[in-house]
Image (cartoon, rainbow, N blue to C red):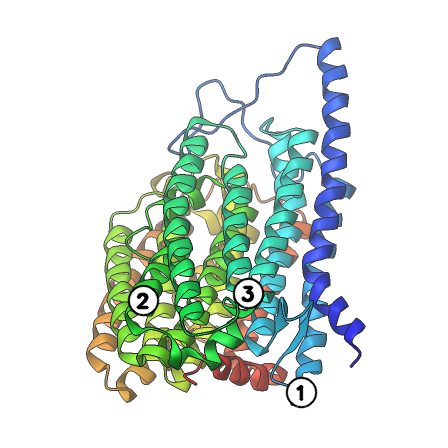
Amino acid sequence: MTSLSTVVLLTTPVAVPLAAAGGYMLTSLSQAAADVRESARSPVRQPALVGATGGRVDGAAAAPPPGADGPRRADWFGLVSPLAVIACGAVLAGVLGDDEAVTAYGGLLRADALTVWMLLVVGAVALIACATSPSYLAGERAAGRTNGRATALFHTLVQAFLAAMCLAVLTANLGVLWVAVEATTIVTAFLVGHRRTRTSVEAAWKYVVICSAGIALAFLGTVLIYYAARQAGISEASALNWPTLVDRAGQLDPDVTRLGITLVILGFGAKAGLVPLHAWLPDAHSQAPAPVSALMSGVLLSVAFTAILRYQVIADAALGTGYTRTLLTGIALLTLALAAALLLAQRDYKRMLAYSSMEHMSLIALGAAIGSPLARTALLLHVAGHGLAKAVAFCASGHVLHLTRTTRIGRVRGLLARAPGPGGTFALAVIALLAFPPFSLFASELGIVRAGFAARMGWAAAVALVLVLIAFAALAARTARMLLGPGPAARTDESPATSLWPLVLGLVACAALGIATGPLTDLLQDAAQAIGAR
């Protein structure tokens, strides 16, 4: 394969979303000028708002069903980016072959099997989110909660968000990795506060403050790893190059490396929704627009944890596997215990899904702590399954919010009878998150537990199983209250088919991964090997 082809394949997942963001930004600016002219001719319309609890604000008109205003043609242009990411990932999977990795720009961008796996996951989840955005935004416009300029800005930020995540998984430089993860914080902060209600703005500020503290810790850890590399004689240009650090990890100062790795795990763990810097997650995910929540929960958490996996390879080679195993096991079990406890008392279905994300990220962290080939394979499969199922769940919750005008679990009854389309997809997504077969989360959770007992970490696996059962009971009970029971005299499910096909596609993909990984089998195994101890 020519170097030019490699450069194109490694650049496209970042360049295409950035180009799309630029196009939407121009649209936003032109729309802003049009809004100024329109406001000069007519009075400003007061938008209907959703209150802090998700209930209807006094005086707000009932929202028309999703799609009443109709998706706009420009809203569909956002699909180009996730399709480009998936296409590049598929081609790179075939290109790697016997090669361990391909690089471009002097090694700044690098794609190994783990990179390709994450590109495919990011592209698949982004496809679901971007395909449901047109109908979601149409419902927001029909309810008076957004306008043309805000819609264009929404697409601009989503595309920039996608570009930052792709850069984070493609770069081989740990400094650029930190910059890319920090960029996701800046972009998504505006998306969390998209509705500009008091609760959404508070959630955005909370997200910025906590994640900035986490990213600051990750920055200090990165600096310490750079210092250890320079002290080991690694050149300045290569001191943050991941393959170089992996090859020469044995020369790093153990004490400095231990402190640096601890800060990195805590810092990037904040972006992954792990304790102790997890408090932003339920607020941000519950207040963000549904497609944004799908992206944040489905892939942002996993992209942040991918950074931890990269650093874990360095730490295991420099310190042995015991240190990161102990640290990650403790964080995983604490996060899982907290998520299970909060799910028991949850009354908001979007926050319920957010705490479910903490539960699944803790299982991924436990798989990384176990560290065996089976555990690494299972955790990567879990990343894909959780991303698909959670994207469907959050996007379906957007339809439920438009139909019911509330996020309170106690105020939603008979959803299957009232709205079979959104209700059915929401139900199946929750079933997937509960790890029922044939969905892939069943196979991945079983693999993590088996790996734990095989690696003499049966106590951790047993504790995790008990906590998962508690979370299972809480999630199942609350979802059943929403779905079951008598519906209204007339069905209110008027969601167009264009808003549901992405959700069905995501559920089919999640189930297919649970039955057989097919052509992705070799890629999954190679990706697990890429983050194995060297």
Distance, label 1 to label 3, CA atoms, is 23 Å
Image-based side of 158 in relation to 217, left or right: right
- The amino acid type found where label 3 is placed reads Asn
Residue named by callout 2? 256
Helix, strand or loop status at disc 2: helix
The residue carrying mark 3 is 173
Residue 473 in picture, x, y percent from top left: 28, 61
Q: Is residue 484 above or below residue 328?
A: above
Classed neighbour count for the residue bearing mark 1: other residues with Cα under 10 Å, few (<14), some (14–19), many (≥20): few
Give the residue type at disc 2. Answer: Val
Secondary structure beneath disc 1? Answer: loop
Front in this rendered view, residue 342 or 249 = 249
Q: Residue type at mark 1?
A: Gly
The numbered mark, 1 or 2, whose residue comes first in the sequence reads 1
Is 406 positioned to the left or the right of 388 in the image?
Answer: left
Q: Is residue 410 left or right of residue 11?
A: left
Residue at (47%, 74%) from the top-left corner? 245
Cα distance in 3D space between marks 2 and 3: 19 Å
Q: Nearer the viewer, mark 1 or mark 2?
A: 2
